[in-house]
Amino acid sequence: MPAVREHVDKMQTRQDKADKPMSAPQKAMRRLGLNSDMELALHLPLRYEDETTLTPIAELRDGDMAQAEGVVRESRVEVRARRQLIARIEDDAGHTLLLRFLNFYPSQQKLLSVGQRVRVRGEVRGGFLGREMVHPECKAVQAGAPLAQALTPVYPTTAGLPQAYLRKAVGRALDKLVLDETLPPQALQIWPGGPRVLADWPLHAALDYLHHPRPEVSLAALQDRSHPAWLRLKAEELLAQQLSQLQARQAQALRRAPTLALGQRGGEAKGLHEQLLAVLPFALTGAQRRVSEEIARDLARPSPMHRLLQGDVGSGKTVVAALAAAVCIDAGYQCVLMAPTEILASQHVKKLVDWLTPLGVRVAWLAGGQKTKERRETLEAIDRAPQEGGAQLIVGTHAVIQDKVRFHKLGLAIVDEQHRFGVAQRLALREKVMEGGDAVEGGAKQPVEPHMLMMSATPIPRTLAMSYYADLDVSTLDELPPGRSPIVTRVISEQRRPELIARIRAQLAEGRQVYWVCPLIEESEAVDLTNATATHAELTAALNDAPHAAPLPPEGASPALGRPGGGGGIQIGLLHSRLPAAEKQAVMAEFVAGRMGLLVSTTVIEVGVDVPNATLMVIEHAERFGLSQLHQLRGRVGRGAQASACVLLYSTGDAPRLGQTARERLKAMAETNDGFEIARRDLEIRGPGEFLGARQSGAALLRFADLATDGELLDWARQTAALMLAQHPVLAERHVARWLGGRVDYLKA
């Protein structure tokens, strides 16, 4: 009975703690995500303060950051332009130091009462009244009080969370944490710096040191993260990431997928894949053939394909997707293609309908803006067997992953511009495609996971492919189709806008078409940028003035760039994300058909729009766009045989010149058209967190390692991860759980 009573008392104590309202510092810690001892231990200092030495007041020099000690001899509040707390302390040698507080609390005034011994730390200034410190840190001490033995950490914090509270919380967490070694002895042997580095710095010792480094440490080694304690931390983090990626690959290999082999129809009839190749109005490039074969081999296996297809703008990813869909449909399964925007999805539908409908494939369109009856009929077709007239290829936006969508027999899911979807959306697609199951040997039922092909026009640099995308196989289209014209890129100032409009007028006179991209839809107090609506009105007035109206296009150029109804002016369209879907499609149809000479747009035309007659791209306020986005926009031109140009129009605003990062981006655009080189430079400028975008949403997967400088550690982590999963699976599980916890799913998205 006493044992039962003790257990009940413990449970009641826990309940009381849970019911107790949180203090302001506790709420602040929760906002920072500091909910466990491990999270506190990994909350590393921003910088350090040296409180290990005292400097005699007589030796203080102007500009020094120093710590001194003395007895308060004078303390008063002065009222000048504002109230100030003035105190003067005297050290044991009789030298004095003035302390000045322009903002102060009663507690500070009490602390600095005459006769109190205090220890102060701050920047020394030389003043009219002698040496002084403004707003120094102060604490009451006894004579002979011991000094700190290590540097004092200064942590990232937030409102309501004082440094003193945070230091105590981190200290308690470090005392309680038990961090057993998870690295096997073999991992120490293959360490690039020799086994002693890892052996001498186990994780707990490394964390202790980074929170409380010795005063003699090289601050440079702490700041550039080259100290052995930092190396241990970064190595463990990279290892956790690699382990989780390899675990994901192993789990994929164990799951079932439909076997979609070429030529499953049998007989002498050509398969859908061969028929599509025969009717395409162009020949595949060598890269397209190679990548299509890689995908076909994956589809023929009984485990699910997880492949990333990357290729530069205009490299022909859509036809590769169509060929993969043909293999899937020929085997009696459905294929779904999901795109991030309706414009991109509708471009896919147009191409796929042109290619596949003549071959008897039923293509369904599913997007958010459909009418109720059309949507209901589409959902019924998706849930119907192909042999009964059901949809075989479904193309749409995120609407394809909504609850009401039920696929009859899904074999392949294709996600275009996968980085544009959030983590939650990509995880929802994984769950959607895993619904249902097929009977397998022995009559048992096992869930069948369709194959997945992810496409990206943003090439992934090698280090990112090895780390963040290690769970995927990567295929690369490194060859552009023949006949594409080179794109000349020019960077010009906003001050030359009239010259640019004259250039546009000349292009339109030759029967060519022009894009003008603006960054915002409407005025914003936060970012004062020209909006698309105002630019549309300005260009309409400038290009349709009487002296220059409607020159006849030359023979062979686009036949009608005037306004409908023969009004004699140049038709200028406006496209942005807030337009209803039907209006967007109508505007794009006019531009694609050549009846619209100039399209003013926001970045909704970033990907997927293919108009060979468009030869000039103007990007307004180019300094505000990311490098990858600039490259994507530039890829909308240069799709025909005519020479094309991209003009990056920049403005410095009130500043005398552009910022360093903006200059680097525009310089890279002017120097190269190579998407892989653009991606490499983009990674250098932004770092992997921003570069990856949505794959990082919700949690930064690398907090300490830097892929730009830690390539050697990444190689070690890859080798060690394979070794641990093969020989030490229990240690591998513990390591991943310690570092990633619930964030493992983000790596699977």
Image: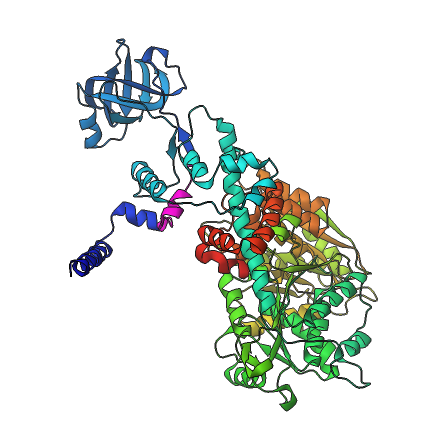
Q: Nearer the viewer, residue 441 or 52?
A: 441
Most distant residue in the top direction: 93
Q: Position of residue 225 (x, y in %)?
A: 52, 35
Locate the C terminus by quadrant.
bottom right
Q: Is residue 739 above or below residue 47?
A: below
In front of the other: 747 or 371: 747
Which residue sits at x=77%, y=57%? 479
Height in image: 177 above or below 283? Answer: above
* Image colouring: rainbow
Residue 490, percent across and down? 71, 46
- Please give left or right for residue 60 compared with residue 290 in the image: left
Residue 626 on the magenta segment: no
Residue at figure coordinates x 70%, y 52% from the top left:
675
Residue drawn at 63 percent across, 48 percent down: 463
Q: Is residue 550 visible?
A: yes
Instruction: From the top left corner, tell me how far across and down residue 526 is, in percent.
Output: 45, 49
611 or 180, which lies in front? 180
Q: Is residue 531 visible?
A: no
Judged by its main secondary structure, the magenta piece is: loop
- Residue 422 versus residue 582 in the image, above or below: above
Quadrant of the image containing the N terminus = bottom left
Please indicate whether residue 324 sits to the left or right of residue 160 in the image.
right
Q: Is residue 635 left or right of residue 521?
A: right
The residue segment tinted magenta is 31-45
* Number of on-image labels: 0
Residue 129: where, in percent of width, then height? Answer: 30, 13
In magenta stretch: residue 35: yes
Determine whether 312 is above or below 451 in the image. Answer: above
